[in-house]
Image (cartoon, grey):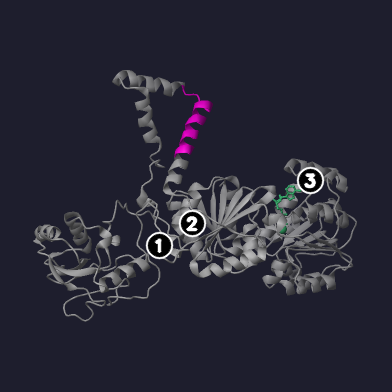
Amino acid sequence: MSQAVPDGIRFADLSLSAPLLKALADVGYETPSPIQAACIPHLLAGKDLLGEAQTGTGKTAAFALPTLDLVDLKARKPQALVLAPTRELAIQVAEAFQKYAHHMKDFHVVPLYGGQSMVVQLRQLSRGAQIIVGTPGRVMDHLKRGSLVLDDLRMLVLDEADEMLRMGFIDDVEWILEHTPATRQTALFSATMPDVIRRVAHNHLRDPQEVKIKSATTTVSAIDQRALVVHGNQKLDALTRILEAEESLDAAIVFARTKIATDELAEKLEARGFAAAALNGDMTQGMRERVIAQLKSGQLDIVVATDVAARGIDVPRVSHVINYDIPYDTEAYVHRIGRTGRAGRQGSAILFVTPRERRMLSTIERATRQKIQPLTLPSLTDLTERRVGQFKQQVMDVLENEDLFFFNELVGQIRDEHDIKPHLIAGALAFIAQRERPLQLDPADWPEILDANRKDGPKRDHDKPRRENRDEILGRRRDVADGKLAQYRIEVGYQHGVTPKEIVGAIANEGGIPGKEIGQIHLFDDHSIVELPSNLSEGVLGKLQRTRVCGQAIRIRHEGNAPARPFKGKPGGKSFDKKGKREGFGDKGKGGDFKPRKPRSFDGPKNSGFDGPKKPKKK
Ligand code: ADP
Ligand code: MG
């Protein structure tokens, strides 16, 4: 920082009034943060101030405490105005004032922001308040209609000035500056100091004291940052594992790019049993406030948010920020991860990077001057161990803390009535207790996450099974072209009501051919063509000869090696690509998460449910 702050400075050294010191003790702040120690004396001395410090460094109290010290509680006229870029921040700052003013009788603060009914705001204003916190647009509205009169204004604070600039409010801010008494004291806070902000400061601040707190290290160092290179269609599964397994996870903010994505993701997480909700600009102010309040109180653990909606959220229990979609720029990244590691706690930030976005990862590393460590996803075994560990702990906690007399008697009765050993009864009870959250994880619910960093064919861990990705499907098709797979004709077709699933099932079961070795299936009216390994033994073929599907003996026979585009235009046959278009090969659709759309042609057994004990997937 540009001015040395003596170490070991205490709030009591800052000549703040007794009610404020009392409130600070209530909220548990031990010492002023560097920006507070540096700014408070200047502001108390009536100086203008230009403060530069990263998010999370405690800027709010840096201006709120001295501002509270100068207001006259007997006068119910606005004496201080704080401009903040968003509704959330305005509310948060107003709440902070309220908190620090807890022991100040007759203190009133009014937040003014768009989206809230004018009627409510007009009523609050007419009752009178010493401090106004608002977004520039709404404050301007009130000034213009005369519902806000700032003749007695003594202090004006511009909070997060760079963000106001980014959001296009700077003209409004200047307008407001020009419409307030020139005698006022002015403080401008910003995480960065671009030229435009400097110009505003130069034009509207009088000989300001400059306070700069060296960035990055203070905020970012308290945050452990990791990144996972992952394919887009596997993000949800990766996220699920992380949320399940992160040791220190208390609450998380998950950032997605669009409003729709926040809704969808929140819904999916809810369906997977997490207490999750979306937070985005489509929600009414009331809904958003409720979500933040629920996150604070622990009713919600996960909030899936857009950048704008989450800006400035200050919920100390947020232990994790997960960048589900990578941010557009490094600044957004820093703001996002600043939602964790609050109030001196340790925070974790996790970044999902699709293979195409790798460049952004190194840009972020360069900008934050920190290496982002690769994230190792927990294996299914890790997840199981963790659940088992938590279960054991729960049992021990109950043994220690609950009155179990009635239950011990009950178990005693079961033991006596059925002559069963207590540990067997306990086993049954454990089974009942874990039903909602099974201790034995079903691999089908936990698809394997491919290592998207590897180009040389995907690595699989033994967790299995998993959906085939696009490369594999194409690879398999290439095998057809190379003669590793051949085409076989079977005498069951569309008119018999057969589905690809039944064909794959029969061939896999009767012929003992692993699902992954079965290629495309094409249904015709009275027969079908199936791609199978070209080297099927006589024994297997014999077995398949006798196999029946839909009441038909399939009488399998070799049709020839499969060409790359085997059926295009062939009369009678219907061949569809993933999108249901008439095409056989080389579709350029994106993603590997294919679902069969038409029963007539079929793209591989992975979709058929015959490749393992696949339970219907939760939403
Ligand atoms: P900024 O505006 O710089 O992003 P905030 O003012 O929102 O930071 O403060 C970040 C967090 O730190 C808040 O949770 C706040 O309550 C907490 N905090 C602020 N000052 C102190 C302090 N002196 N001691 C402990 N916690 C503090
Ligand atoms: Mg702030």
Residue for badge 1: 458
Find out if the beta carbon at label 3 lies less than 8 Å from the nearest ligand 1 atom. yes
Residue for badge 2: 266
C-alpha distance separating marks 2 and 3 = 38 Å
Residue sticking out furthest to the bottom: 569
Q: Horizontal and vertical percent for residue 252?
A: 56, 52
Query: Which amino acid, mark 2?
Result: Ala
Labels 3, 1: front one:
1
Q: Is residue 566 magenta?
A: no
Query: Which amino acid, mark 1?
Result: Pro
Between discs 2 and 3, the one toward the N terminus: 3
From this view, report whether residue 99 is shown above or below residue 530.
above
Query: Which amino acid, mark 3?
Result: Thr
**Which of the 4 quarters of the picture holds residue 423?**
top left
Residue for badge 3: 31
C-alpha distance separating marks 3 and 1 = 52 Å
In the displayed structure image, the side of residue 396 where residue 20 appears, left or right? right
C-alpha distance separating marks 1 and 2 = 29 Å
Circle 3: element type: loop
Question: Which contiguous range is marked in magenta?
Answer: 388-404
